[in-house]
C-alpha cells in the first residue's frame, strides 16, 4: 500500500474507521491495556505512531495525567481532524500530521521547539502498513532510548483451537481493508503478508528489550507486545 493510496483510503472512510476503532467489542479494553503496557507515570511523555482518529489518546492521557504530554502522529488529514475533535478538551494532548517512519518528534510538544524526552511509544494496528516494520521498530526504540517502553498491538491470524472461523473472518476483513477494495483477486495473500510484517516487528521489539510482555486478545487475533528497552 503506497502512502498516497493509504491516505486516500482512510480519508474516505474515516467515519466508519472511527466507529470500528471505538465500538468493536473487545477493542476498547485492548486500547486501555495498551496504554497500561506503556508503563507510564504522571508527568511522562508518550507518542502514539499512527494515532488514527485518536481512540487511544484519552487512555494515554489517563496514564500521564494533566502534567504529562501525549502526542499523536498520523498522515491522513481527515482522520487527524476527527482525532483533534475527540481530544479538544485536553490541553496536553497534541495531534501532529506526519509519517510514523519519519516522525516529526524531537520537539517540545508545548513549544514545538527544542527536544522532548520520550518515555514511551505506542503503535496499534500500524506496522502492517509499513514497508519495513522491523526497521521502524528500530527507529522507535532509538527515539525512546534505554529504560523507555515501546508497545505494539496488531491483528494477525489466531492460533487458538477455535481459529478456523475466526481466521476466515480475519482474512475477509484484511481483503476488504486492502485498497483498492473493489478488487476480487490480489497477487499473493494479503493476510499472509500482514502476518509476516507483524511477526517481524514484534520479534524485533523482543530482541531490543530487556523485559517483554506478550499477550493475545480478541479471540487470539490481536497480539500485544510491550518491551522495556535495554
Image (cartoon, grey):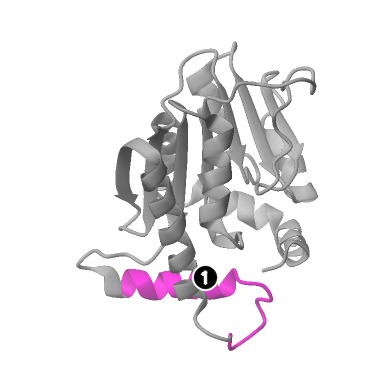
Q: Position of residue 220 (x, y in %)?
A: 31, 58
Question: Would you say 141 lies left or right of 209 here?
Answer: right
Tell me what residue is drawn at x 66 percent, y 21 percent. Answer: 116
The structure residue drawn at horizontal position 60% and vertical position 61%, both measured from the top left corner, is: 129
Residue 70: percent from left, percent from top: 62, 26
Looking at the image, which residue is at 69% across and 41% down?
103
Q: Quadrant of residue 155?
A: bottom left
> Which residue position is annotated with label 1?
174
Quick check: is 172 in the magenta stretch?
yes
Question: In which quadrant will I find the N terminus?
Answer: bottom right
Q: Position of residue 117 (x, y in %)?
A: 60, 21
- Of 199 and 230, nearer the camera is 230
Q: Is residue 71 above or below residue 128?
A: above
Q: Quadrant of residue 54?
A: top right
Circle 1 SS class: helix
Quadrant of image for the C terminus: top left
Q: Which residues are magenta?
A: 165-186
Left or right of 68, for residue 216: left
Q: Is residue 135 above or below residue 57?
A: below
Amino acid at each position: 500500500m503506497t502512502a498516497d493510496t493509504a491516505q486516500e483510503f482512510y480519508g474516505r472512510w474515516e467515519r466508519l474507521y472511527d466507529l470500528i476503532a471505538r465500538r468493536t467489542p473487545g477493542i476498547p479494553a485492548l486500547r486501555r491495556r495498551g496504554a497500561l503496557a506503556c508503563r507510564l507515570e504522571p508527568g511522562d511523555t508518550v507518542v502514539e505512531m499512527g494515532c488514527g482518529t485518536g481512540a487511544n489518546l484519552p487512555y494515554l492521557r489517563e496514564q500521564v495525567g494533566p502534567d504529562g504530554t501525549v502526542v499523536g502522529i498520523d498522515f491522513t488529514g481527515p482522520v487527524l481532524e476527527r482525532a483533534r475533535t475527540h481530544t479538544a478538551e485536553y490541553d496536553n494532548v497534541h495531534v501532529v500530521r506526519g509519517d510514523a517512519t519519519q516522525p516529526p518528534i524531537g520537539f517540545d510538544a508545548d513549544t514545538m521547539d527544542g527536544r522532548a524526552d520520550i518515555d514511551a511509544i505506542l503503535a496499534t494496528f500500524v506496522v502492517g502498513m509499513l514497508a519495513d516494520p522491523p526497521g521502524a521498530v528500530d527507529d522507535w526504540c532509538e527515539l525512546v532510548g534505554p529504560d523507555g517502553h515501546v508497545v505494539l498491538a496488531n491483528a494477525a491470524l489466531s492460533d487458538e483451537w477455535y481459529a478456523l472461523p475466526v481466521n476466515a473472518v480475519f482474512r475477509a476483513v484484511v481483503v476488504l481493508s486492502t485498497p483498492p477494495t473493489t478488487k476480487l483477486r490480489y497477487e499473493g495473500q494479503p493476510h499472509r503478508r500482514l502476518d509476516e510484517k507483524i511477526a517481524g516487528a514484534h520479534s524485533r521489539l523482543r530482541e531490543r528489550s530487556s523485559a517483554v510482555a506478550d499477550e493475545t486478545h480478541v479471540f487470539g487475533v490481536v497480539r500485544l507486545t510491550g518491551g522495556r528497552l535495554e
